Amino acid sequence: MSSSKPPTITAFAQSPDEGQGLARDMRVRWALEEVGQPYDVCLVSFAAMKEPAYRALQPFGQIPSYQEGDLILFESGSIILHIAHHHAGLLAANANVRARAITWMFAALNTVEPPIVELEQASFLKLYKACHAQLIPILEDRVRARLGELSNRLGDADWLDGAFSAGDLLMVMVLRRLDGTGIVEEYHNLGDYVARGEARPAYQRAFAAQLAVFKGKA
Amino acid sequence: MSSSKPPTITAFAQSPDEGQGLARDMRVRWALEEVGQPYDVCLVSFAAMKEPAYRALQPFGQIPSYQEGDLILFESGSIILHIAHHHAGLLAANANVRARAITWMFAALNTVEPPIVELEQASFLKLYKACHAQLIPILEDRVRARLGELSNRLGDADWLDGAFSAGDLLMVMVLRRLDGTGIVEEYHNLGDYVARGEARPAYQRAFAAQLAVFKGKA
């Protein structure tokens, strides 16, 4: 799988979160930093993402996509799993430990993230104010249900299942989407867990790289 | 990884969809049938799913969980990937083809399924009728956006990327959640795609097995 040219990922040319690192390219940047692999970044505009040329890379018109030689992937979970399968640092060698970490990758993306995205998107819905006021608390409680369950499982451990894994990487990034809502902070161990992820040198390098794009220095 | 005792999955003791096969155990049953592996089923009540004993298997109190010797997994995507890694029939041997199929697994679960689940759940929200009438069309259009993109990518192919894979299995199951809404049928190639999945002998065996639970014959 190795090639002389580093892989290329796509990212937003105009960061919608103004460099907070919440877009999904941050997840892939972090993974690549954890395994010590260089990468190139191709910045795409919102207009370009809707064009057929980009849809050939990413049929849903989203970022990131990932190109490595003639292999084209999308979906941050899939890209990170690919990276983890080919480089040490994100998944253990032991088959059972690895399978459990992959379980946490899917749990982050299919169980914890969807209600968080829904809460985000509800704030963009053009509903009458009364509807909005009714809807938001319901969606917040749906997020809290998942976070309470996650908090119970994590307990006082540093990471979800032994050593840091790609499952933790995705879970930390999913929880970060709640930045500013105060919901994660209701669960002290989850707040500490996110901080532990953000403190990793690989996270810091990835964060700086995406921030440089927003500041026009990339 | 092989052991003499077949793996055990958990499934609803009381099928909430009355045997329509929409619960996530169906996905795992189908995967096991595709690779020709026997399995045991442990039926759990809604009350038992909320108990600590079950949370030890599945921290979010959902089905399915998967036990194979001392390995415990959850998340249908993770379980299916585990099965696919250990048995031929769901992922190609070629590394690039395999990576692309895994991309479709994540796309099914993290891009296509979330707006479908949201549309489902909105019908259970206790909002005033006026709010509900406003919300549903917005959520339906969000589902249509994803289905339109998926339909464009599929085109006139039988499956999403060459031969049938675990990515198709999950995508077909995710689209089946829209049964009765008529939305999939707006995209003729997607309707045919789902029918093609449902026609597979492995699907039929899995469907019959979950239906037998509802009918009290399992």
Image: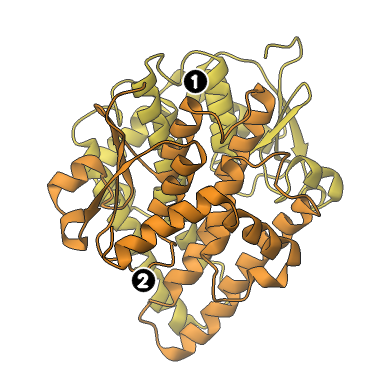
Chain colours: A yellow, B orange
State the quadrant of the N terminus of chain B. top left
- Residue A202 is tagged as 1
Residue shown at 64% from the left, 68% from the top: B184
Q: CA distance from mark 1 to mark 2?
A: 48 Å
- Residue B18 is tagged as 2
Q: Is residue B112 visible?
A: no
Number of numbered discs present? 2
- Mark whose residue sits in front, 1 or 2: 2
Q: Quadrant of residue A140?
A: bottom left
Contact, mark 1 vs mark 2 (Cβ under 8 Å): no
Mark 2: few/some/many CA within 10 Å (<14, 14-19, 20+) = few
The percent coordinates of residue B57 (x first, y second) are 23, 41
Residue that sits furthest to the left in the current view:
B52
Q: Quadrant of residue B161?
A: top right
Q: What residue type is disc 1 on?
A: Ala
Vertical comparison of A31 with A133: above or below: above
Vertical comparison of A194 with B21: above or below: above
Residue B203 left/right relative to B15:
right
In the image, B199 versus B94, the foreground residue is: B199
Q: Is residue A106 visible?
A: yes
Quick one: SS at disc 2? loop
In the image, A176 versus A28, the foreground residue is: A28
Residue shown at 63% from the left, 72% from the top: B183
In the image, B41 versus A155, the foreground residue is: B41
Please, which chain is the residue tagged with disc 1 on?
A
The percent coordinates of residue A142 (x first, y second) are 34, 62
Residue shown at 44% from the left, 90% from the top: B129
Please, which chain is the residue tagged with disc 2 on?
B
Residue shown at 34% from the left, 28% from the top: A196
Q: What residue type is disc 2 on?
A: Glu
- Residue B118 is tagged as none
